[in-house]
Amino acid sequence: MTETRQAEWIQYYIINGDLKLPPGTAAVQVAHAATTLTLHYLLNGKEQEAFRSWLETGQRKVVLIGSAQQVTNLADQGYLSVRDSQLSQGEEAPLTIVALPPLNRDDAAPLLEGLTEL
């Protein structure tokens, strides 16, 4: 008898490591991204099946660190991005974090190449 492997749904948060954020600031950025992404799903009704599966399977989250370029590349692909105006010094607010929607681990792998786990 063959067992069917259940999809492992994970939500990934990628912090801009070039900013060298203190742990508390990084935690606030993750919370901001998580809240914004959740509100997006609740209010827009898109991709509800993946979000619901993620909710029902433990709401696993992984925080990764990438370079400013890696984070920018993900933001340019349309993933939720957060800029923190409190970290700017008169210039454009820096891109602090990108949040990926709940993804199956296997589907996320190509997006996560070169990133390190926090």
Image (cartoon, rainbow, N blue to C red):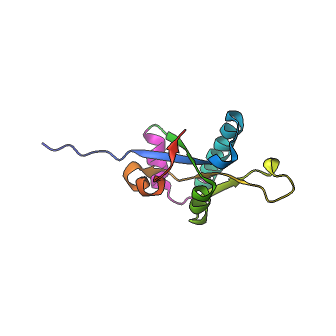
Membership of 50 in magenta stretch = yes
From the viewer's perspective, is 46 left or right of 19? left
Residue 84 in percent (x, y) is at 76, 50
Membership of 45 in magenta stretch = yes
Q: Which residues are magenta?
A: 42-57
- Residue 79: tell me if it is visible: no
- Residue 7: tell me if it is visible: yes
Q: Nearer the viewer, residue 17 or 49?
A: 17
- Residue at point 38% right, 44% down? 8
Q: Nearer the viewer, residue 62 or 32?
A: 62
Q: Nearer the viewer, residue 103 or 40?
A: 103
Residue 72 in percent (x, y) is at 62, 60
- Residue at point 67% right, 40% down? 26
Residue 79 in percent (x, y) is at 58, 59
Q: Quadrant of residue 40?
A: bottom right
- Residue at point 66% right, 37% down? 27
Figure check: 102 above or below 118: below
Q: Quadrant of the C terminus?
A: top right
- Count the marks: how many? 0
- Residue at point 40% right, 49% down? 105
Q: Nearer the viewer, residue 80 or 66?
A: 66
Q: Quadrant of residue 49?
A: bottom left
Residue 107 in percent (x, y) is at 40, 55
Helix, strand or loop for the magenta stretch, by majority: helix
Q: Quadrant of the N terminus?
A: top left
Figure check: 99 above or below 58: below
